[in-house]
Amino acid sequence: MDFNVFFTPEFFNNILSIVRQLWFLWLPFVLLFLFWEFWVVYIRTRYIKELSWVLLEIKIPKEIEKSPRAMEAVFSALHATREGNLIERFWQGFLTPWFSFEITSFNGVIHFFVYAQKFFKRMVESQIYAHYPDVEIAEVDDYIFNLPPNIPNEDWQAWGAEFVLTKEDAYPIKTYMDFKLEDSKEETEKIDPINSFLEFIGSLKEGEQLWFQILIKGASDKWKETGDKLVKKLLGDKKNKKTEEAGKSGLGIMALSPGEQDAIKAIERNIAKLGFETGIRFLYFARHDIFNFINVASMMGVMKQYNTLHLNGFKPKNGTGVDYFFREKRGFRLKRRMIKAYKKRSYFYPPYKKKSFVLNAEELATIYHFPGRVAKTPTLGRVGARKGEPPPTLPV
């Protein structure tokens, strides 16, 4: 059939004429849709603007003999998925709470931070104290104001990127269990990937800074359902293939290779734990005369420690580098935008909404935890001895 006979200029003109004549039928729906989109953005922006936040610095002792499992318990305790009722969501703008776990280096001096709503301050403190009783937690001024607000400028250069997963969320990254941090009895036997990160950022020079941010909010059970479907798909594909080869013998699992069986077990173990919508980004700042792109490459290398070929890993995305077409202007805008997004701790909601991915509590604890005695980074701020017990009024 020759469709050119039907799709002529006259045909499209007739369609447009009909659309114009029936404007009173479709225009109200278009306006209602646009109003609703505007309203949702407005009430959510208003809700976010009215929130009060605190930045908590965690100073760690000289000796921590706990594995990242302790931090996993902290993350699990902060898992909240409440979305609010219809009135709260669409009239008040209520949003599921989120947190930002941050590691920074200012001229080579390392700091651990947690950025949270004031409402959750005592809960965050109590959970950290419960699992790390020897740390010190203090509310501090936000470090984002320590640098000029107009970077990049004639004095400072910047570069940043976000990280996403290489495969579906259900595939796990390499965790502390894979690094045997839970099994090793001696500190000297432990290979903790966070130590490489701390050694790297601890080597930054005067006039260099690196900010690393992990934003999280509780994920619904939907990610587990997606993982279950992925397992069934993997099993189904192999079952169908084996059935064809064996004359419909129905031997499904028998067709799986050892690697495929391990992958399915890893997925099932991964989705059995609490999941968090996650966004990860970093920013590297330096004065123009000492800016060194090797530090950007080193950050990429740090994140590759968690990658495995048959499961999951991280890859950079939305970097501030531009390869062609107005490189300087486009790169400048990208850097300014990412810096603003970092400072506002914005990822899941306006004004800098991005597509998130899901990590479970074990995966998060692998990336963000307090290092043990084996970490010898001299610029890692530690407290020599406890200066006080946790406040007795903290909830348990």
Image (tube, grey):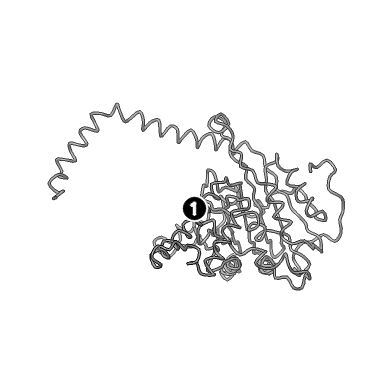
**Is any part of residue 141 visible from this angle?**
yes
Residue 372 lies in quadrant? bottom right
Q: Nearer the viewer, residue 247 or 286?
A: 247
| The furthest residue to the top | 24
Name the spot of residue 256 as percent of width and height, x first.
Answer: 50, 67
Residue 294 lies in quadrant? bottom right
- The answer to whether 11 is drawn above or below residue 320 in the figure is above
Name the spot of residue 129 as percent of width and height, x first.
Answer: 79, 51
Horizontally, residue 18 falls left or right of residue 201, namely left
| The furthest residue to the bottom | 189
Horizontally, residue 143 falls left or right of residue 230, namely right
**Amino acid found under the numbered disc labelled 1:** Lys
From the image, tell me which residue sits under label 1: 229
In what quadrant of the picture does the C terminus appear? top right
Horizontally, residue 330 falls left or right of residue 200, namely left
Q: At x 58% / y 54%, what residue is drawn?
A: 271
Q: At x 71% / y 51%, what residue is drawn?
A: 74
Residue 37 lies in quadrant? top left
Name the spot of residue 26 as percent of width and height, x first.
Answer: 31, 30
Q: At x 40% / y 33%, what residue is drawn?
A: 33
- The answer to whether 265 is drawn above or below residue 52 in the figure is below
Q: Nearer the viewer, residue 53 or 92?
A: 92
Horizontally, residue 357 falls left or right of residue 11, namely right
Q: How many marks?
A: 1
Disc 1 element: helix
Name the spot of residue 265 as percent of width and height, x first.
Answer: 58, 61
Query: Few, some or many C-alpha atoms within 10 Å of disc 1 (few <14, some 14-19, many ≥20)?
Result: few
**Is any part of residue 204 visible from this angle?**
no
